[in-house]
Image (cartoon, rainbow, N blue to C red):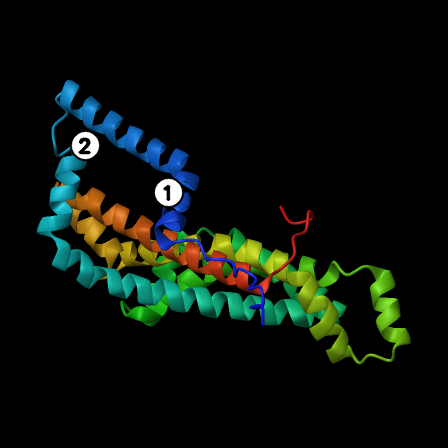
Amino acid sequence: MAEASQIPMPVPAPRLNRMLDAVVARGPALAAVAGLLLLWQGVVWFFEVPEYMAPSPVAVLGAFQENAGTLWLNFWPTFFEAALGFVAGNLVAILLAVWFVHNSTAERAFFPIAVFINTIPIIALAPVLVLIFGNGFAPKIIIAGLICFFPTLVNMVRGLKAVPPATLDLMRVLSASNWEIFWKVRLQSSLPFLFAALKIASTTCVIGAIVAEWIGSNFGLGALIIEATFNFRSPLLYATVFTAALLAVVMFALVSFAEAKLIRWKTSDVH
């Protein structure tokens, strides 16, 4: 009997090829970063800038190596404050947005208050919260949450209302309950708007935590920035700033990863 012909199975791309593709895709960004670092090093070397004013990238790298333990110990409190503030601030904003969409009276009553709170500078509000709650984690988490709150509230309200009227009419004709309309229509419509706000909040929550640590704290990246500044330890100052930036980038990447997994479509209405 003749042997049955076998259909060749597709061979998955080797891992090395996928890594090379990723490097090529990020090539312009990597080249830009490398060029800026070389320019920075060249300017510091050519103009003989004192290290206490502007350390070179080599000096900053040395500060990373010499103070790795200190940076690591101060990284975790800031991460804890930023992450909890991110979760708390966005959760409250989402719940309020749902309430506003289903209760126009509540929206008219409380939305102006939310706007007013958002107009208060965080740097002015931080000392008040420190006086009330002390120098512990509570004021830092609250400030990180407040800085996340308003953008998410505005975007979530807009997203929940961005359902075409014809779609709502169709759901009512099909005798859908308010819960079914919310879960199957409004929530799906709001996800692109929500993640647009969460991307902003993922970086600003780190700013809020660090600003709160400036006001009153003995630990965290914000406190380390103040200490390094007052002691003219510029390499450590720059290393701490880059560590805070890395934390914000990681949180942004996590939100982007969640968006890619949860949203399978794109919309042109989100800016």
Q: Amino acid at mark 1?
A: Val
Q: Earlier in the sequence, mark 2 or mark 1?
A: 1
The percent position of residue 243, horizontal first and vertical second, equals: 26, 51
Q: Position of residue 179 (x, y in %)?
A: 73, 79
Dot 2: element: loop
Judge from the rendering whether residue 89 lies leftward or rightward of residue 136; answer left or right: right
Residue neighbourhood size for the residue with mark 2, other residues' Cα within 10 Å, grouped as few (<14), some (14–19), many (≥20): some
Can residue 216 be seen at all in this image of the molecule?
Answer: yes
Give SS at disc 1: helix
**Quadrant containing the N terminus in the rendered view:** bottom right
Residue, x 38% and y 65% (percent of image)? 83
Given this view, does label 2 or label 1 mark the residue nearer the observer? 1
Which residue is at a point 62% across and 56% down the rendered structure image? 193
Please indicate whether residue 154 sits to the left or right of residue 186 in the image.
left
In this view, the residue farthest toward the front is 1
Between 226 and 68, the residue placed more toward the observer is: 68
- Viewer-nearest residue: 197 or 218: 197
Q: Which mark is residue 213?
A: none
Residue 47 seen in the current view:
no
Q: Label 1: which residue? A: 23
What residue lies at 32% left-to-right and 49% top-to-bottom? 245
**Of all residues shown, which one is farthest toward the left?**
66
Q: Residue at x 35, y 32 (%)?
A: 32
Type of the residue with mark 2: Ala
Q: Which mark is residue 54?
A: 2
Residue 23 quadrant: top left
- Measuring from the top left, give residue 20's x and y in whole percent: 37, 44
Seen from the viewer's position, the closer of residues 250 and 44 is 250
When asked about the image quadrant of residue 213, the answer is: bottom left
